[in-house]
Image (cartoon, rainbow, N blue to C red):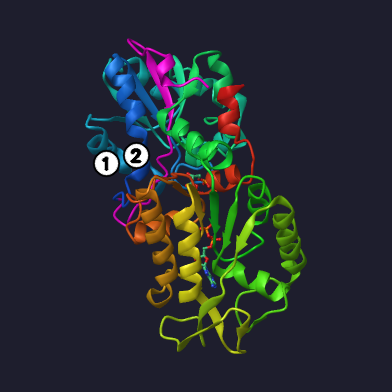
Amino acid sequence: MKTLEDFNFEMKKALIRVDFNVPLDEDFNVTDTNRIEAAKPSIIKVLEDGGSAVLMSHLGRPKGERNPDFSLEHICKTVSEVIGVQVKFVNDCVGEVAEQAVANLQAGEVLLLENLRFHSSETIGDATFAVQLSKLGDIYINDAFGTAHRAHASTTVVAKYFGENKCFGYLLAKEIESIEKVMQTGEKPVLAILGGAKVSSKITIIENILDKVDHLIIGGGMTYTFVKAQGGEVGDSICEDDKMPLALDILKQAKEKGVQVHIPVDVLAADDFSNDANTQVVDVDKIPDGWQGLDAGPRTLENFKEVILKSKTILWNGPVGVFEMENFAKGTIGVGNFIDESTQGGAFSLVGGGDSVAAVKQFGFQDKVSYVSTGGGAMLESLEGKTLPGIAAILG
Ligand SMILES: Nc1ncnc2c1ncn2[C@@H]1O[C@H](COP(=O)(O)OP(=O)(O)O)[C@@H](O)[C@H]1O
Ligand SMILES: O=C(OP(=O)(O)O)[C@H](O)COP(=O)(O)O
Protein backbone atom coordinates (compact mmCIF):
# COMPACT_ATOMS: atom_id res chain seq x y z
CA MET A 1 0.00 0.00 0.00
CA LYS A 2 1.73 3.16 -1.24
CA THR A 3 1.37 6.14 1.06
CA LEU A 4 2.73 9.66 1.21
CA GLU A 5 5.85 8.37 2.96
CA ASP A 6 6.92 6.76 -0.31
CA PHE A 7 7.23 10.16 -1.98
CA ASN A 8 9.24 13.30 -1.64
CA PHE A 9 7.27 16.24 -2.96
CA GLU A 10 10.13 18.72 -3.33
CA MET A 11 9.34 20.89 -6.36
CA LYS A 12 6.40 18.61 -7.14
CA LYS A 13 2.75 19.49 -7.56
CA ALA A 14 0.45 17.10 -5.73
CA LEU A 15 -3.09 16.73 -7.03
CA ILE A 16 -5.05 15.78 -3.92
CA ARG A 17 -8.64 14.48 -4.00
CA VAL A 18 -10.10 15.55 -0.69
CA ASP A 19 -13.66 15.27 0.62
CA PHE A 20 -14.57 18.84 1.47
CA ASN A 21 -18.26 18.03 1.20
CA VAL A 22 -18.87 19.86 4.47
CA PRO A 23 -22.09 21.23 5.96
CA LEU A 24 -22.76 24.96 5.44
CA ASP A 25 -25.25 27.24 7.19
CA GLU A 26 -27.54 29.67 5.35
CA ASP A 27 -24.72 32.23 5.16
CA PHE A 28 -22.40 29.60 3.65
CA ASN A 29 -20.26 29.28 6.78
CA VAL A 30 -18.77 25.85 7.41
CA THR A 31 -20.52 24.36 10.46
CA ASP A 32 -18.27 21.30 10.84
CA THR A 33 -14.59 21.50 9.87
CA ASN A 34 -13.83 17.88 10.70
CA ARG A 35 -13.27 16.74 7.10
CA ILE A 36 -10.96 19.70 6.43
CA GLU A 37 -8.95 19.05 9.58
CA ALA A 38 -8.74 15.38 8.64
CA ALA A 39 -7.15 16.25 5.27
CA LYS A 40 -4.62 18.65 6.82
CA PRO A 41 -1.76 16.19 7.59
CA SER A 42 -1.44 15.12 3.94
CA ILE A 43 -1.42 18.70 2.71
CA ILE A 44 1.17 19.71 5.30
CA LYS A 45 3.43 16.79 4.35
CA VAL A 46 3.45 17.95 0.71
CA LEU A 47 4.20 21.55 1.72
CA GLU A 48 6.91 20.61 4.23
CA ASP A 49 8.65 18.52 1.56
CA GLY A 50 8.83 21.69 -0.54
CA GLY A 51 5.96 20.92 -2.90
CA SER A 52 2.64 22.55 -3.68
CA ALA A 53 -0.88 21.18 -3.28
CA VAL A 54 -3.78 21.31 -5.71
CA LEU A 55 -6.98 20.38 -3.88
CA MET A 56 -10.01 19.01 -5.67
CA SER A 57 -13.38 18.14 -4.15
CA HIS A 58 -17.10 18.10 -4.69
CA LEU A 59 -19.60 19.98 -2.53
CA GLY A 60 -23.19 18.75 -2.49
CA ARG A 61 -24.91 17.44 -5.58
CA PRO A 62 -25.13 20.29 -8.13
CA LYS A 63 -25.89 17.73 -10.86
CA GLY A 64 -23.40 18.88 -13.48
CA GLU A 65 -24.44 22.53 -13.39
CA ARG A 66 -22.56 25.58 -12.24
CA ASN A 67 -24.58 26.63 -9.19
CA PRO A 68 -23.10 29.34 -6.93
CA ASP A 69 -24.76 27.81 -3.86
CA PHE A 70 -22.38 24.87 -4.23
CA SER A 71 -19.22 26.85 -4.94
CA LEU A 72 -16.14 25.73 -3.04
CA GLU A 73 -15.18 29.39 -2.84
CA HIS A 74 -17.50 29.53 0.21
CA ILE A 75 -15.12 27.30 2.15
CA CYS A 76 -11.80 28.71 0.95
CA LYS A 77 -11.39 30.98 4.00
CA THR A 78 -12.08 28.14 6.40
CA VAL A 79 -9.64 25.86 4.58
CA SER A 80 -6.98 28.60 4.88
CA GLU A 81 -7.64 28.93 8.63
CA VAL A 82 -7.54 25.20 9.27
CA ILE A 83 -4.43 24.55 7.19
CA GLY A 84 -2.67 27.73 8.26
CA VAL A 85 -1.81 28.74 4.71
CA GLN A 86 -3.57 31.32 2.52
CA VAL A 87 -5.35 29.06 0.02
CA LYS A 88 -5.79 30.28 -3.56
CA PHE A 89 -8.97 29.57 -5.46
CA VAL A 90 -9.69 29.04 -9.15
CA ASN A 91 -13.23 29.07 -10.49
CA ASP A 92 -13.03 25.90 -12.53
CA CYS A 93 -11.48 22.50 -11.98
CA VAL A 94 -10.32 21.86 -15.56
CA GLY A 95 -9.30 23.76 -18.69
CA GLU A 96 -7.17 26.79 -19.40
CA VAL A 97 -7.96 28.74 -16.23
CA ALA A 98 -7.22 25.80 -13.93
CA GLU A 99 -4.05 24.83 -15.80
CA GLN A 100 -2.79 28.40 -15.64
CA ALA A 101 -3.47 28.62 -11.90
CA VAL A 102 -1.53 25.39 -11.37
CA ALA A 103 1.34 26.63 -13.54
CA ASN A 104 1.57 29.78 -11.38
CA LEU A 105 1.62 27.79 -8.14
CA GLN A 106 4.86 28.05 -6.17
CA ALA A 107 6.38 25.62 -3.69
CA GLY A 108 4.58 25.94 -0.34
CA GLU A 109 1.34 27.16 -1.92
CA VAL A 110 -2.12 25.59 -1.94
CA LEU A 111 -4.74 25.92 -4.67
CA LEU A 112 -8.39 24.92 -4.29
CA LEU A 113 -10.22 24.05 -7.50
CA GLU A 114 -13.91 24.80 -8.06
CA ASN A 115 -16.49 22.07 -7.41
CA LEU A 116 -15.81 18.98 -9.55
CA ARG A 117 -19.54 18.30 -9.81
CA PHE A 118 -20.13 21.48 -11.81
CA HIS A 119 -19.20 19.09 -14.64
CA SER A 120 -21.43 16.06 -15.21
CA SER A 121 -18.30 14.31 -16.55
CA GLU A 122 -17.14 13.92 -12.94
CA THR A 123 -19.91 11.62 -11.72
CA ILE A 124 -20.10 9.58 -14.93
CA GLY A 125 -16.36 8.97 -14.68
CA ASP A 126 -15.60 10.46 -18.08
CA ALA A 127 -12.07 9.61 -19.28
CA THR A 128 -11.49 12.86 -21.21
CA PHE A 129 -12.37 14.85 -18.09
CA ALA A 130 -10.06 12.64 -16.00
CA VAL A 131 -7.22 13.30 -18.47
CA GLN A 132 -7.84 17.04 -18.05
CA LEU A 133 -7.65 16.67 -14.27
CA SER A 134 -4.47 14.63 -14.54
CA LYS A 135 -2.70 17.61 -16.10
CA LEU A 136 -3.01 19.45 -12.78
CA GLY A 137 -0.39 17.55 -10.80
CA ASP A 138 2.73 15.38 -10.91
CA ILE A 139 1.57 12.99 -8.21
CA TYR A 140 -2.02 11.98 -7.40
CA ILE A 141 -3.05 11.54 -3.77
CA ASN A 142 -6.46 10.20 -2.84
CA ASP A 143 -7.39 11.34 0.66
CA ALA A 144 -11.17 11.43 0.16
CA PHE A 145 -12.43 8.49 2.18
CA GLY A 146 -15.97 9.90 2.33
CA THR A 147 -16.16 9.67 -1.48
CA ALA A 148 -14.13 6.48 -1.95
CA HIS A 149 -17.31 4.48 -2.67
CA ARG A 150 -17.98 6.60 -5.77
CA ALA A 151 -16.42 5.52 -9.07
CA HIS A 152 -16.06 9.08 -10.30
CA ALA A 153 -13.46 10.71 -12.55
CA SER A 154 -11.54 12.35 -9.68
CA THR A 155 -11.69 9.35 -7.31
CA THR A 156 -10.92 6.45 -9.64
CA VAL A 157 -10.48 7.15 -13.37
CA VAL A 158 -7.85 9.86 -12.91
CA ALA A 159 -5.56 7.47 -11.01
CA LYS A 160 -4.63 5.47 -14.06
CA TYR A 161 -3.07 8.49 -15.75
CA PHE A 162 -0.49 8.79 -12.99
CA GLY A 163 1.14 5.36 -13.42
CA GLU A 164 3.23 4.72 -10.30
CA ASN A 165 2.88 8.32 -9.15
CA LYS A 166 -0.17 7.81 -7.00
CA CYS A 167 -0.78 7.01 -3.36
CA PHE A 168 -3.14 7.05 -0.39
CA GLY A 169 -3.25 10.17 1.73
CA TYR A 170 -2.81 9.85 5.50
CA LEU A 171 -6.54 10.08 6.14
CA LEU A 172 -7.50 7.38 3.66
CA ALA A 173 -4.73 5.13 5.02
CA LYS A 174 -5.98 5.69 8.58
CA GLU A 175 -9.57 4.87 7.63
CA ILE A 176 -8.45 1.65 5.91
CA GLU A 177 -6.32 0.70 8.91
CA SER A 178 -9.23 1.32 11.32
CA ILE A 179 -11.58 -0.86 9.31
CA GLU A 180 -8.94 -3.59 9.13
CA LYS A 181 -8.50 -3.44 12.90
CA VAL A 182 -12.17 -4.28 13.32
CA MET A 183 -12.61 -6.69 10.43
CA GLN A 184 -9.28 -8.54 10.44
CA THR A 185 -6.61 -7.78 12.97
CA GLY A 186 -8.51 -6.61 16.05
CA GLU A 187 -7.74 -8.02 19.46
CA LYS A 188 -10.49 -10.38 20.71
CA PRO A 189 -13.20 -10.25 21.88
CA VAL A 190 -14.44 -8.24 18.91
CA LEU A 191 -17.84 -6.59 19.31
CA ALA A 192 -20.11 -4.91 16.77
CA ILE A 193 -22.93 -2.70 18.02
CA LEU A 194 -25.47 -2.24 15.27
CA GLY A 195 -28.39 0.08 15.82
CA GLY A 196 -30.38 2.42 13.63
CA ALA A 197 -33.86 2.23 12.27
CA LYS A 198 -34.22 -0.73 9.97
CA VAL A 199 -32.94 -4.26 9.49
CA SER A 200 -33.28 -3.90 5.72
CA SER A 201 -30.53 -1.26 5.52
CA LYS A 202 -28.11 -3.32 7.63
CA ILE A 203 -28.60 -6.88 6.29
CA THR A 204 -25.42 -7.03 4.23
CA ILE A 205 -23.40 -5.56 7.08
CA ILE A 206 -24.76 -8.06 9.60
CA GLU A 207 -24.09 -10.99 7.29
CA ASN A 208 -20.56 -9.81 6.53
CA ILE A 209 -19.75 -9.04 10.13
CA LEU A 210 -20.84 -12.40 11.53
CA ASP A 211 -17.59 -13.86 10.24
CA LYS A 212 -15.51 -11.23 12.03
CA VAL A 213 -16.95 -10.70 15.50
CA ASP A 214 -17.37 -12.60 18.75
CA HIS A 215 -20.29 -10.50 20.01
CA LEU A 216 -23.06 -8.65 18.22
CA ILE A 217 -25.32 -6.14 19.93
CA ILE A 218 -28.50 -5.42 18.02
CA GLY A 219 -30.29 -2.28 19.16
CA GLY A 220 -32.51 0.57 18.03
CA GLY A 221 -35.40 0.05 15.68
CA MET A 222 -33.95 -3.22 14.35
CA THR A 223 -34.67 -4.89 17.67
CA TYR A 224 -38.38 -5.36 17.08
CA THR A 225 -38.09 -7.38 13.88
CA PHE A 226 -35.86 -9.83 15.76
CA VAL A 227 -38.16 -9.92 18.79
CA LYS A 228 -41.37 -10.40 16.81
CA ALA A 229 -39.72 -13.08 14.66
CA GLN A 230 -39.12 -15.05 17.87
CA GLY A 231 -42.77 -14.74 18.92
CA GLY A 232 -42.60 -11.57 21.01
CA GLU A 233 -45.25 -8.85 21.11
CA VAL A 234 -43.81 -5.54 19.94
CA GLY A 235 -46.95 -3.36 20.00
CA ASP A 236 -46.64 -0.45 17.59
CA SER A 237 -42.82 -0.53 17.45
CA ILE A 238 -41.10 -0.17 14.08
CA CYS A 239 -40.99 -3.66 12.60
CA GLU A 240 -40.29 -5.09 9.17
CA ASP A 241 -42.51 -8.17 9.05
CA ASP A 242 -41.12 -9.28 5.69
CA LYS A 243 -37.63 -9.41 7.24
CA MET A 244 -38.61 -11.72 10.10
CA PRO A 245 -37.47 -14.92 8.33
CA LEU A 246 -34.17 -13.21 7.62
CA ALA A 247 -33.84 -12.18 11.27
CA LEU A 248 -34.29 -15.81 12.32
CA ASP A 249 -31.75 -16.90 9.72
CA ILE A 250 -29.25 -14.32 11.05
CA LEU A 251 -29.71 -15.70 14.59
CA LYS A 252 -29.18 -19.25 13.27
CA GLN A 253 -26.05 -18.24 11.35
CA ALA A 254 -24.72 -16.46 14.43
CA LYS A 255 -25.19 -19.59 16.53
CA GLU A 256 -23.41 -21.73 13.94
CA LYS A 257 -20.52 -19.27 13.81
CA GLY A 258 -20.24 -19.00 17.58
CA VAL A 259 -21.24 -15.33 17.67
CA GLN A 260 -23.09 -14.25 20.81
CA VAL A 261 -26.00 -12.00 19.91
CA HIS A 262 -27.28 -9.52 22.50
CA ILE A 263 -30.76 -8.13 21.91
CA PRO A 264 -32.54 -5.72 24.31
CA VAL A 265 -34.53 -7.41 27.08
CA ASP A 266 -36.43 -4.29 28.13
CA VAL A 267 -37.24 -1.00 26.44
CA LEU A 268 -38.52 2.46 27.15
CA ALA A 269 -41.86 2.40 25.37
CA ALA A 270 -43.91 5.47 24.42
CA ASP A 271 -47.58 5.95 23.51
CA ASP A 272 -46.60 8.27 20.67
CA PHE A 273 -43.53 8.94 18.48
CA SER A 274 -42.93 12.18 20.33
CA ASN A 275 -40.64 13.55 23.02
CA ASP A 276 -43.70 14.46 25.10
CA ALA A 277 -45.26 11.01 24.94
CA ASN A 278 -46.12 9.02 28.08
CA THR A 279 -43.49 6.37 28.73
CA GLN A 280 -43.05 3.11 30.59
CA VAL A 281 -40.30 0.49 30.82
CA VAL A 282 -41.57 -2.86 29.58
CA ASP A 283 -40.15 -6.25 28.63
CA VAL A 284 -39.15 -6.13 24.99
CA ASP A 285 -41.45 -9.04 24.09
CA LYS A 286 -44.49 -7.69 25.95
CA ILE A 287 -45.00 -4.22 24.48
CA PRO A 288 -48.72 -3.40 24.67
CA ASP A 289 -50.66 -2.32 21.59
CA GLY A 290 -50.59 1.46 21.22
CA TRP A 291 -47.02 1.58 22.60
CA GLN A 292 -43.71 1.56 20.76
CA GLY A 293 -40.16 0.92 21.92
CA LEU A 294 -38.05 4.03 21.40
CA ASP A 295 -35.02 3.41 23.62
CA ALA A 296 -33.10 0.70 25.43
CA GLY A 297 -34.29 -0.09 28.96
CA PRO A 298 -32.18 -0.20 32.18
CA ARG A 299 -31.67 -3.99 32.27
CA THR A 300 -30.67 -3.93 28.62
CA LEU A 301 -28.10 -1.23 29.32
CA GLU A 302 -26.63 -3.33 32.14
CA ASN A 303 -26.26 -6.23 29.70
CA PHE A 304 -24.74 -4.00 27.03
CA LYS A 305 -22.33 -2.55 29.60
CA GLU A 306 -21.03 -5.98 30.54
CA VAL A 307 -20.33 -6.94 26.91
CA ILE A 308 -18.83 -3.56 25.97
CA LEU A 309 -16.48 -3.51 28.98
CA LYS A 310 -15.07 -6.95 28.23
CA SER A 311 -14.53 -6.27 24.51
CA LYS A 312 -11.11 -5.30 23.16
CA THR A 313 -12.25 -4.18 19.72
CA ILE A 314 -15.54 -2.33 19.24
CA LEU A 315 -17.39 -1.17 16.15
CA TRP A 316 -20.38 1.10 16.67
CA ASN A 317 -22.81 1.78 13.86
CA GLY A 318 -26.23 3.21 14.57
CA PRO A 319 -27.94 4.63 17.66
CA VAL A 320 -29.78 2.29 20.05
CA GLY A 321 -32.74 4.64 20.42
CA VAL A 322 -34.36 7.70 18.91
CA PHE A 323 -31.52 9.88 20.19
CA GLU A 324 -32.82 12.97 18.38
CA MET A 325 -35.49 13.18 21.09
CA GLU A 326 -34.05 14.00 24.51
CA ASN A 327 -36.27 11.56 26.40
CA PHE A 328 -35.09 8.65 24.24
CA ALA A 329 -31.38 9.45 24.09
CA LYS A 330 -30.39 7.76 27.35
CA GLY A 331 -29.58 4.40 25.74
CA THR A 332 -27.35 5.90 23.06
CA ILE A 333 -25.58 8.10 25.65
CA GLY A 334 -25.15 5.05 27.89
CA VAL A 335 -23.59 3.02 25.09
CA GLY A 336 -21.27 5.95 24.32
CA ASN A 337 -20.20 6.11 27.97
CA PHE A 338 -19.50 2.36 28.15
CA ILE A 339 -17.43 2.56 24.96
CA ASP A 340 -15.54 5.49 26.48
CA GLU A 341 -14.79 3.41 29.58
CA SER A 342 -13.75 0.40 27.53
CA THR A 343 -11.52 2.57 25.32
CA GLN A 344 -9.84 4.03 28.41
CA GLY A 345 -9.19 0.45 29.47
CA GLY A 346 -7.30 -0.20 26.23
CA ALA A 347 -9.98 -1.27 23.73
CA PHE A 348 -9.94 0.01 20.15
CA SER A 349 -13.24 1.65 19.23
CA LEU A 350 -14.42 2.74 15.81
CA VAL A 351 -17.58 4.71 15.09
CA GLY A 352 -18.87 5.18 11.60
CA GLY A 353 -21.49 4.82 8.96
CA GLY A 354 -24.67 6.70 8.22
CA ASP A 355 -25.97 8.89 11.02
CA SER A 356 -23.88 7.31 13.79
CA VAL A 357 -21.34 10.09 13.67
CA ALA A 358 -24.09 12.69 14.20
CA ALA A 359 -25.09 10.95 17.44
CA VAL A 360 -21.49 10.74 18.62
CA LYS A 361 -20.88 14.42 17.93
CA GLN A 362 -24.16 15.52 19.50
CA PHE A 363 -23.14 13.93 22.80
CA GLY A 364 -19.45 14.82 22.61
CA PHE A 365 -18.06 11.29 22.28
CA GLN A 366 -15.81 12.05 19.31
CA ASP A 367 -12.74 12.49 21.52
CA LYS A 368 -13.57 9.51 23.71
CA VAL A 369 -13.53 6.78 21.08
CA SER A 370 -10.40 5.66 19.24
CA TYR A 371 -11.55 6.73 15.81
CA VAL A 372 -14.57 8.42 14.23
CA SER A 373 -14.80 7.78 10.52
CA THR A 374 -15.15 10.72 8.12
CA GLY A 375 -17.27 8.58 5.79
CA GLY A 376 -20.96 7.75 6.06
CA GLY A 377 -21.86 5.73 2.97
CA ALA A 378 -18.22 4.81 2.37
CA MET A 379 -17.95 3.27 5.83
CA LEU A 380 -21.23 1.37 5.43
CA GLU A 381 -20.00 -0.12 2.14
CA SER A 382 -16.67 -1.05 3.74
CA LEU A 383 -18.51 -2.84 6.55
CA GLU A 384 -20.51 -4.68 3.91
CA GLY A 385 -17.18 -6.10 2.75
CA LYS A 386 -17.07 -4.20 -0.53
CA THR A 387 -13.79 -2.99 -2.01
CA LEU A 388 -14.28 0.72 -2.54
CA PRO A 389 -13.45 1.90 -6.09
CA GLY A 390 -11.37 4.82 -4.83
CA ILE A 391 -9.17 2.44 -2.86
CA ALA A 392 -8.96 -0.14 -5.66
CA ALA A 393 -7.81 2.58 -8.09
CA ILE A 394 -4.73 3.33 -5.98
CA LEU A 395 -3.90 -0.32 -5.47
CA GLY A 396 -4.44 -1.21 -9.15
N1 LIG B 1 -36.58 2.29 18.41
C1 LIG B 1 -36.52 3.07 17.34
N2 LIG B 1 -37.61 3.35 16.64
C2 LIG B 1 -37.52 4.14 15.56
N3 LIG B 1 -36.38 4.68 15.09
C3 LIG B 1 -35.27 4.43 15.76
C4 LIG B 1 -35.26 3.61 16.91
N4 LIG B 1 -34.00 3.55 17.36
C5 LIG B 1 -33.24 4.31 16.54
N5 LIG B 1 -33.99 4.84 15.57
C6 LIG B 1 -33.58 5.79 14.52
O1 LIG B 1 -32.63 5.26 13.66
C7 LIG B 1 -32.07 6.34 12.95
C8 LIG B 1 -30.69 6.02 12.46
O2 LIG B 1 -30.82 4.92 11.65
P1 LIG B 1 -29.76 4.57 10.55
O3 LIG B 1 -29.74 5.66 9.54
O4 LIG B 1 -30.02 3.18 10.10
O5 LIG B 1 -28.44 4.58 11.39
P2 LIG B 1 -27.06 4.97 10.87
O6 LIG B 1 -27.31 6.20 10.07
O7 LIG B 1 -26.31 5.22 12.09
O8 LIG B 1 -26.57 3.86 10.06
C9 LIG B 1 -32.05 7.48 13.92
O9 LIG B 1 -32.62 8.59 13.29
C10 LIG B 1 -32.89 6.99 15.10
O10 LIG B 1 -33.85 7.92 15.53
O1 LIG C 1 -20.77 13.21 2.36
C1 LIG C 1 -20.59 12.21 1.68
O2 LIG C 1 -21.25 11.05 1.91
P1 LIG C 1 -21.91 10.64 3.35
O3 LIG C 1 -22.98 11.64 3.65
O4 LIG C 1 -22.47 9.25 3.10
O5 LIG C 1 -20.78 10.63 4.35
C2 LIG C 1 -19.59 12.18 0.58
O6 LIG C 1 -19.02 13.44 0.36
C3 LIG C 1 -20.17 11.59 -0.70
O7 LIG C 1 -21.16 12.42 -1.21
P2 LIG C 1 -22.24 11.83 -2.21
O8 LIG C 1 -23.10 10.86 -1.44
O9 LIG C 1 -23.01 13.02 -2.75
O10 LIG C 1 -21.49 11.10 -3.32
Question: Could you tell me if the residues under marks 2 and 1 are in contact, i.e. CB atoms within 8 Å?
Answer: yes
Is disc 1 placed on a helix, strand or loop?
Answer: helix
Q: Residue at x 40, y 71 (%)?
A: 330
Residue highlighted by disc 2: 36
Work out whether residue 99 can be spotted.
Answer: no
Q: CA distance from mark 2 to mark 1?
A: 9 Å
Dot 2, how many residues are within 10 Å of its Cα: few (below 14), some (14-19), or many (20+)?
Answer: many
Q: Residue at x 48, y 45 (%)?
A: 375
Q: Which mark is residue 359?
A: none
Q: Which residues are magenta?
A: 1-28
Q: Is mark 2 within 8 Å of ligand 2?
A: no
Residue 189 location (% of width, % of height): 54, 48
- The quarter of the picture where residue 229 lies is bottom right
Is disc 2 placed on a helix, strand or loop?
Answer: helix
Q: Nearer the viewer, residue 25 or 82?
A: 82
Q: Residue furthest top?
A: 11
Q: Which mark is residue 78?
A: 1
- Tag 1: amino acid: Thr
Work out whether residue 301 can be spotted.
Answer: yes
Nearest to N terminus: mark 2 or mark 1: 2
- For the C terminus, the image quarter is top right
Taking 150 as reference, is 284 above or below it? below
Q: Nearer the viewer, residue 284 or 377?
A: 284
- The quarter of the picture where residue 291 lies is bottom right
Taking 95 as reference, is 35 above or below it? below
Taking 127 as reference, is 245 above or below it? below
Residue 280 location (% of width, % of height): 48, 87
Dot 1, how many residues are within 10 Å of its Cα: few (below 14), some (14-19), or many (20+)?
Answer: some
Q: Residue at x 42, y 44 (%)?
A: 21
- Tag 2: amino acid: Ile
